[in-house]
């Protein structure tokens, strides 16, 4: 099955062909760890986690190497460490751990590799030295700068001319620069800041060189896919290409020798406004997961196509919770059917079709949808098609044995397809009742039995009283074909 992706550099949707199908490589820019991640930071994590899952499905789990870095050298990190009177690793270790825990709560798989800047200083220094050697960088007053005019293809990713970028960019004007647009590869550390040795004096790297060096050191060049948010196209990814190409070749027009495919997710807004600290509308993942299941946040982030803007609202979360409740509700009913009609021995190979053959329902349709540039809105819609197929199986008349294993087959398919999106992997009872402790669960189950008995005896007053008691416990009762189920109210 062909995977087609929108390539930012090529400006079209193209077929993805890895350099080596036995080692597919992907790099996504990760966080600068000095504070909590906001919901905008989580969008690329979730988007590229879906791509990671799809690549593993297509090429095999062991064939895909996914790196998402940690930036642990930065001015804001230094400022926070100085303000708190601690070493930078105290700050970075704390917030890296929080970041990883928060992304795990969104069902994001851990990347294969999570390189850190502080662990790759030798690679950074080596790449800067290669740039100087190849005539694309120069040392001046303890700094090393990239000579932008030496790379004729500069601007190809962002589709800007060098003159336009110079006119529109906010650049540091410094006497040691050959040209105002030249950017820093290495700079002296200020008093009290962390510093590392280099041939140009003690100091620390610039932001852009960090990713270029970590990619070359940890994945090798060229990588197959480089991903990140739309805001990173310029200047960060533009500068990455320049560094990565020129450190290898010393000349222009070799963009694909660094990354073969470039992907960028769209912006996230808050109630139609740009998210910013000055507006006070930044929402932290760490806080959101206290009020919403991580799976709700994840699916909300996937509700729009990854390249499109996404407006983040409470209504979006409410509707997404209802979407997941409907899917999990069907899975719970299917689970009850299987408990009612135990599966016979050998059911795994008995998958009934119209012509009487026995096959396993396949996930081909879902994979095909995702292979069309990660079309997650269509994939979510397809889950409801599968849901309807599942309901059709356990609600259909027919032999009890067939109802059982048909239901199980399509239940497994819905869960499998949900797994490609990183959802529907929780037991449905746990989904609805996960916030209830053992005592509350036992009390609710006893009340449901009593309510069933009251209804059977046509004692409607007692049944209503029990329902009121359940309401007081914040429990919602749902009557279905397999009996009453319940969930904690949101």
Image: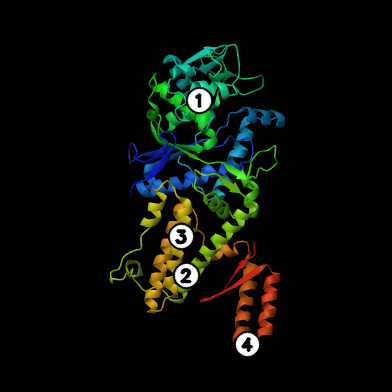
C-alpha separation, residue under disc 3 versus residue under disc 2: 15 Å
Q: Which mark is residue 180?
A: none
Q: Are marks 1 and 4 in contact (CB under 8 Å)?
A: no
Pointer 1 or 4: first along the chain: 1
Above or below residue 449? Residue 293 is above
Q: Residue at x 67, y 28 (%)?
A: 79
C-alpha separation, residue under disc 3 versus residue under disc 1: 42 Å
Label 3 or label 1, whichever lies nearer to me, is 3
Closer-to-camera residue (198/32):
32
Q: Residues within 10 Å of mark 3 (few under 14, many from 20)?
A: some
Residue 37 point in image, percent of width and height = 61, 41
Element at badge 4? loop
Which residue bears the numbered disc 1? 209
Which residue bears the numbered disc 2? 334
Residue 113 visible to the viewer: no
Q: Residues within 10 Å of mark 4 (few under 14, many from 20)?
A: few
Question: Where on the picture, by quarter, is residue 224?
Answer: top left
Q: Residue at x 61, y 74 (%)?
A: 445
Pointer 2 or 4: first along the chain: 2
C-alpha separation, residue under disc 1 versus residue under disc 4: 75 Å
Pointer 1 or 2: first along the chain: 1
Q: Which mark is residue 458?
A: 4
Q: Are marks 3 and 2 in contact (CB under 8 Å)?
A: no
Residue most extreme to the bottom? 457
Element at badge 3? helix
Residue 121 point in image, percent of width and height = 51, 25
């Amino acid at each position: 099955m062909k995977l087609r992706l929108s390539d930012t550099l090529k400006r079209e949707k193209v077929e993805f062909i890895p350099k080596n199908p036995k080692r597919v490589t992907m790099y996504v820019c990760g966080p600068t760890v000095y504070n909590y991640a906001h919901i905008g930071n989580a969008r690329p994590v979730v988007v590229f986690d879906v791509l990671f899952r799809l690549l593993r499905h297509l090429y095999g789990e062991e064939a895909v190497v996914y790196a998402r870095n940690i930036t642990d050298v930065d001015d804001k990190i230094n400022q926070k460490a100085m303000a708190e009177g601690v070493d930078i690793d105290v700050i970075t270790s704390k917030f890296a751990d929080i970041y990883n825990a928060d992304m795990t709560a969104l069902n994001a798989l851990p990347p294969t590799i999570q390189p850190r800047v502080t662990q790759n200083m030798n690679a950074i220094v080596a790449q800067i030295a290669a740039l100087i050697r190849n005539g694309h960088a120069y040392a001046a007053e303890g700094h090393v700068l990239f000579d932008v005019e030496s790379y004729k293809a500069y601007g190809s990713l962002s589709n800007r001319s060098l003159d336009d970028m110079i006119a529109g960019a906010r650049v540091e004007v410094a006497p040691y620069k050959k040209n105002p647009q030249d950017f820093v590869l290495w700079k002296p550390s200020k008093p009290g800041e962390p510093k590392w040795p280099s041939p140009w004096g003690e100091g620390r790297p610039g932001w852009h060189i960090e990713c270029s060096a970590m990619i070359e050191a940890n994945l090798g060049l060229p990588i197959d896919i480089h991903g990140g948010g739309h805001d990173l196209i310029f200047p960060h990814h533009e500068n990455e290409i320049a560094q990565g190409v020129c450190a290898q070749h010393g000349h222009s027009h070799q963009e694909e020798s660094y990354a073969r495919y470039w992907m960028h997710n769209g912006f996230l807004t808050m109630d139609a406004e740009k998210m910013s600290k000055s507006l006070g509308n930044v929402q932290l993942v760490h806080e959101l997961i206290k009020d919403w299941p991580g799976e709700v946040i994840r699916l909300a982030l996937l509700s729009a196509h990854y390249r499109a803007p996404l407006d983040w609202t409470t209504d979006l979360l409410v509707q997404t919770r209802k979407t997941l409740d409907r899917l999990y509700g069907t899975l719970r009913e299917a689970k009850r059917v299987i408990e009612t009609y135990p599966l016979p021995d050998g059911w795994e190979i008995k998958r009934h079709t119209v012509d009487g053959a026995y096959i396993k329902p396949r996930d081909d349709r879902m994979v095909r949808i995702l292979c069309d540039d990660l079309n997650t809105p269509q994939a979510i819609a397809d889950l409801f098609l599968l849901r309807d197929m599942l309901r059709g199986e356990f609600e259909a008349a027919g032999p009890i044995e067939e109802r059982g294993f048909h239901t199980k087959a399509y239940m497994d398919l819905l869960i499998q397809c949900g797994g490609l999106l990183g959802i529907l992997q929780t037991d449905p009872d746990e989904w609805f009742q996960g916030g209830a402790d053992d005592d509350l669960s036992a009390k609710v189950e006893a009340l449901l039995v009593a309510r069933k008995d009251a209804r059977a005896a046509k004692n409607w007053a007692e049944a209503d009283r029990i329902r009121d008691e359940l309401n007081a416990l914040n429990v919602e009762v749902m009557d279905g074909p397999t009996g009453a189920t319940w969930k904690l109210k949101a």
